[in-house]
Image (tube, rainbow, N blue to C red):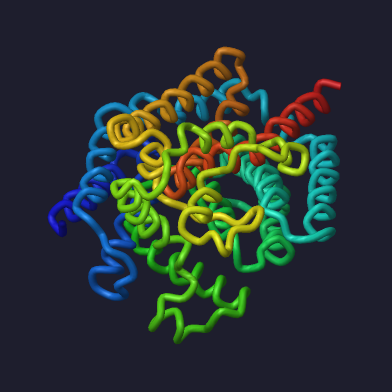
Amino acid sequence: MDIIVGLHFILILILFLRGKEFLMDQIYAISSILFIIFPYYLHRFVLPFYFPTLEVNLIHLLATISYCFFARSRGLNVSHKIVLLKEQNVWLPIVNAQRTRYVVYVIFAMHTLLLITGGQSSAKVLFTLGVFLLFLFLGFLCNYLNDKKVYRPNLYFILAIALFAITYKYGFVGFGRMILFKFVLGTYIIYGFFYEFTFNKKLIVLLLLPVMIFAGALLRAQKSGTGGLSSIINEGAGIGSIVSPMRETEAIFEVLAAQEHELLKGESYAAAFLFFIPSALWEGKPLGFGSEIVKWFYPEYYVEFHSLAATFIAEPYANFGYLIGIPLSFVLIHIFSFLTRLVYYLLNKRNDFVLGLLVLVIFYCAIPDYIWGGVHASVARSGFTFVPIVLYYFVLKRTIKS
C-alpha cells in the first residue's frame, strides 16, 4: 500500500510543478495532498485514526491517472486573455473611476452589516466570499492595467483584506475551515492569473501546506474550546475536517460491501442541485451526502445542517454501487473540467473576459470541495459564491455605462 500511495504522491507532485498556466492541475494537486495523501501518512507515521485499505487508495490513484490523461487543463491558458485586457484598455477606466469606488463602498458596507448581524451562517460567509474574490480580482487588475509589475496596495486590496478580517471575526466560530480556506485559495488563483508561479514559489506553497494544516487545527481548537497546542500535537485535535473524509470513505466502502445500508440511488446528486430550496419549505427534500453519512454512522447525532464528508469516490459508490459508482467517480472530474472550459469560452465569445475569469475562479475554488466531499459540497458552496460575483459584476458595468 505504501508503494501505491507513494506513486500517487509523485504523480500529484508532477501535476503541481507543471507550467504556470495549468492552475487547475495545481489546485487538484493541493487538494489531493491535503485530503488524500496527508491523512494516509499521518495515520502511517503519527496518529493511527482509521484503517486504510489497498482498494480505496488504488481507486484514488486511478482517478488521478484518469484526470492526467483526460481532464487536466490542457489549453486553458488565461495569460493571453489578461494581456488582451491591457491591450484593449477597456477596464482601466472602470477600475479607476470614482463612480466605481462609490459602488464598491456600498457593497462593502452591505456585506459588513450582513456579517455582523444575526448568527453565524456558512451561507453568509460563502456569499461574502464572492465579494472578497471580486474585490481581490479588481485589485490585481488595477495593478496590472497600471503596469505595476509587483503588488501595490490599492482600494480594492484594502477592502478585500478588511472583509476577510470581518469574516474571520464574525463569521467563523471554529467550524467551516474549508470555507475559510477558500479565501486563501482564491487569492492563490487570482494571483496566478496575473503573475507567474515560478518553481521556487510553488516549492514555498508546498512547504506551507503543513503550516496551513497546523494553523487550521489551532484555529479550530482555540475557537471551539476543544484544546490547545499540546492536544493538537499529541491527539490530533482540530484536524478532523482534513483527515475524516478518508476515514468515512473507508467506512462507506466497508458497510456497502457488507450490504448494511441501501444505495442512495442518486438522492445526494438531486440534493446538490436543489440546495437553494430551504428545507423548511420542503419537508421531504433530498438529503445531501454529508447528512446521509451522519444518518448512516452517527444517527444519534443527526440534526439539521449537521454533516460529515467523504472523498469524491465515496459519493458515486454510495449512490450507484461498485459497477457504476467507481467508473462514475473517474468521469465526474472530466465533466467538471469540461463545464469549466465551456463556460469560460462561452463568456469569452461575448467578450466578457473579466466575467469569464471570475467564473473560472469559482470553478477552481470548488475543486477542493469536490475532492473533500463530492458533488453536493462543491455545487452548493459554489452556488452561494457565484451569485454575488455575477450580480455585482453587472452592477459595476451598468454603473459605468450609465
> With 249 as the anchor, is 44 left or right in this view?
left
Q: Quadrant of the N terminus?
A: bottom left
Nearest the eye: 226 or 368? 226
> With 28 as the anchor, is 66 left or right in this view?
left
Rendering quarter of residue 251: bottom left
Identified at 61% across, 41% down, the residue is: 137
Can residue 100 be seen by looking at this rendering? Answer: yes
User: Residue at the bottom extreme?
Assistant: 230
Q: Quadrant of the C terminus?
A: top right
Q: Is residue 239 above or below residue 384?
A: below
Q: Point out residue 94 in the picture as x, y percentages from the top left corner.
A: 73, 30
Nearest the eye: 73 or 260? 260
Identified at 52% across, 75% down, the residue is: 218
Q: Point out residue 126 in the picture as x, y percentages from the top left corner.
A: 66, 48
Q: Is residue 216 above or below residue 342?
A: below
Q: Point out residue 302 in the picture as x, y percentages from the top left corner.
A: 59, 58
Nearest the eye: 131 or 278? 278
Q: Point out residue 30 in the picture as x, y percentages from the top left corner.
A: 38, 51
Rendering quarter of residue 166: bottom right
Identified at 80% across, 26% down, the residue is: 400
Nearest the eye: 90 or 167? 167
Identified at 64% across, 53% down, the residue is: 305
Q: Is residue 215 above or below residue 181?
A: below
